[in-house]
Image (tube, rainbow, N blue to C red):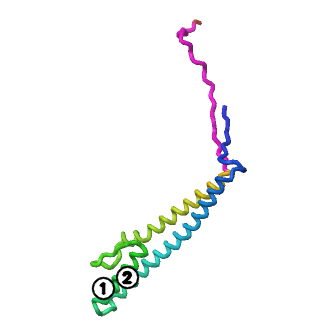
Amino acid sequence: MRRVIYLRIADRDVHLPRLIGAFVLAAAVLMFFQASFAMVDSWNTVKYYGSCIDSLSSIPDVSDQRAQFTFCSDALYRATGVVVRGDRPVLTLAQFWGAILSPIANLLFWLAALMFGYLVYKSGDLVLPIEERITEVSEPRTPGQTFRKKRK
């Protein structure tokens, strides 16, 4: 025998889950946009750093080259947190992906928070079906009952 029980998370008259969901949703939308802007800014900064380093060869004075490198690496550090070593001004593959993947992960986190906020907001309409199976079980033996063979 089967029974299906419908479990409702909240009722239509309960507004507290919707209020919490609305706040989470609003904050997640704002942070999602901020993370997307940070991701685009990080990508543009990495591209700018490449062109900034390429222009070092056109500067004849070594002290001016060092000043330009310091400016370029400082701009990259402030935007992405990537530190460039002085002996090798070109970004390594790990530094490049480290600068790009962190904002992408941040964007995906806020997308998940956005979905969670929407789920909490719609919790008044959420119904979870739970299946319950009932099986007939024979009654347990009494302590005085013994096993006997049936005769034919």
In the displayed structure, 149 sits above or below 124; it is above
Is residue 136 rendered to the left or right of residue 103? Answer: right
Of all residues, the one furthest to the bottom in this rendering is 60
Which of 138 and 44 lies nearest the eye of the viewer? Answer: 44
Q: Position of residue 146 (x, y in %)?
A: 53, 9
Q: Earlier in the sequence, mark 2 or mark 1?
A: 1
Location of the C terminus by quadrant is top right
Is residue 79 rendered to the left or right of residue 10? Answer: left
Q: Residue at x 67, y 39 (%)?
A: 5
Q: Which residue is mark 2?
A: 72
- Report the span colored magenta: 126-150
Q: Which residue is mark 1?
A: 66
Q: Amino acid at mark 2?
A: Cys
Q: Residue at x 60, y 19 (%)?
A: 139
In the rendered structure, find residue 142 and report the number of the disc placed on it.
none
- Local packing at callout 1 (Cα closer than 10 Å; few below 14, some 14-19, many 20+) is some
Q: Secondary structure at mark 2?
A: helix
